[in-house]
Amino acid sequence: MILLQKPAIEGGKPERAEYLVFGSPEILQPEIDEVVDSLKKCWIGTGPKVLRFEKEFRDYIGSRHAKALNSCTAGMFLSLLVAGVKPGDEVITTPLTFASTANVILHIGAKPVFVDVEKETMDINPKLVEKAVSRKTRAIIPVHLAGRPCNMDEITRIAEEKKLLVVEDAAHAIEAKYHGKKIGNISDLTAFSFYATKNVVCGEGGMVTTNNAQWAEDIEKYALHGLNKGAWQRYTDDGFKQYEVVFPGYKFNMMDLQAALGIHQLARVEENLKKRGRIWKQYDEAFSDLPMILPALPEENTVHARHLYTPLLQIEKLRKGRDFIQNALHKENIGTGIHFISLHLHRYYKEKFGFKENDFPNAKFVSDRTISLPLSPKLSTQDVEDVINAVTKVLGYYKK
Ligand SMILES: Cc1ncc(COP(=O)(O)O)c(C=O)c1O
């Protein structure tokens, strides 16, 4: 007979003494030195390091242009704006995403049209995208959830046939490739995130890649009040240059302090992907007998960016629901995340569009069961073991 260990939430001993913060980034000496260098040079706003980061990012992705911003959210918003999405247009996207994917559609004045995800991949279902296209549809925003590339062959085909714009939400997918092509070099515009938990972190930050020179130029101007010259061009030792407002823009520019982190994070991006791949494999092996549906294997000839490890709890086989299990892991001193509760279940979207829980059954299924386990390249062998032991203990205890 196997003796079940009592979880900390039931009065047992926590799996570890120190709290394991979910998504804590790995910041190493090169980043620290680069930030200090910016501080010492007193060029902390948008300047040479942002230009260098843009160039290195462009080279990494293989796109013609890369424009650095203060967030991926700003990137998606400006992408829709410069490509001409207008009030009254419809934009098709997934409800199983972070708020900003749909919020930016509303900020443009357009209408987000949600279609359900595939249960296995958790990415937008292209068959449903095709069905949802109307006379008002102007764009599609696929989201590469957890780092798994969407079915871009089908999405591109639909977009070409129906003459739609594609703006990819690649917040999770910096390293991803789809059928040999790098994400960021497939569609019209692609937005990436460098938020504190992402695969490349700047604290806050984002980047848009595109092969369209006009859109790239417009994004840069819109990100800095609609001025025709940035600070870097205005205040260099060549002397002050006058600027003109060419349209009323926003304040979405990236600072050199952020780029200082990004440059060195980007240099380690592939090495970190390998590290996360190893942790992923350890989890897959350790959890194969637990009441969980493990993340689907990546499709052939694709690279999964392995941003989030998101198994689904088989709640039918457990005595407790997902939120309780998450809290039980918290009591074991293991931090976890939820990616995501489908947007159609959130108050604003539910009330505004009158959604019912089962309007998107697969997104609802995932919302009720998903849990993201720690996957940072910073995790030590002991950290990974602690996660495995805590999950095994808690799920073993509450198994029916
Ligand atoms: C899927 C997805 N899209 C967009 C964003 C927004 O990124 P940012 O915080 O850089 O605006 C996030 C951030 O968590 C995200 O997870």
Image (cartoon, rainbow, N blue to C red):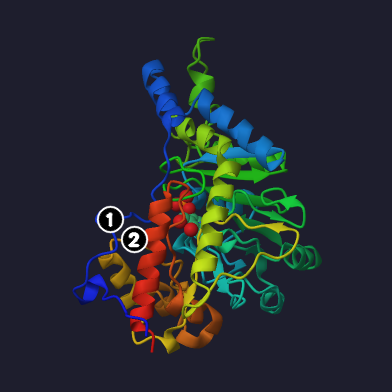
The residue at 23%/73% (across/down) is 9
**Position of 277 compared to 197: left or right?**
right
Q: Nearer the viewer, residue 150 or 321?
A: 321
Q: Quadrant of the N terminus?
A: bottom left
The residue at 77%/64% (across/down) is 153
Residue bearing the label numbered 1:
19
Q: Are marks 1 and 2 in contact (CB under 8 Å)?
A: yes
Q: Nearer the viewer, residue 37 or 358?
A: 37
Q: Position of residue 165 (x, y in %)?
A: 69, 59
Q: Position of residue 302 (x, y in %)?
A: 71, 58
The residue at 58%/52% (across/down) is 81
Q: Secondary structure under badge 1?
A: loop
Q: Pointer 2: residues within 10 angstroms few (<14), some, or many (20+)?
A: many
Q: Position of residue 84 (x, y in %)?
A: 64, 54
Q: Secondary structure under badge 2?
A: loop
> For residue 335, which numbered disc appears in the image?
2
Q: How many marks?
A: 2
> For residue 61, which numbered disc appears in the image?
none
The earlier-in-sequence mark between 1 and 2 is 1
Amino acid at circle 1 = Tyr
Q: Measured along the vertical axis of the image, is residue 204 above or below residue 283?
A: above
Amino acid at circle 2 = Gly
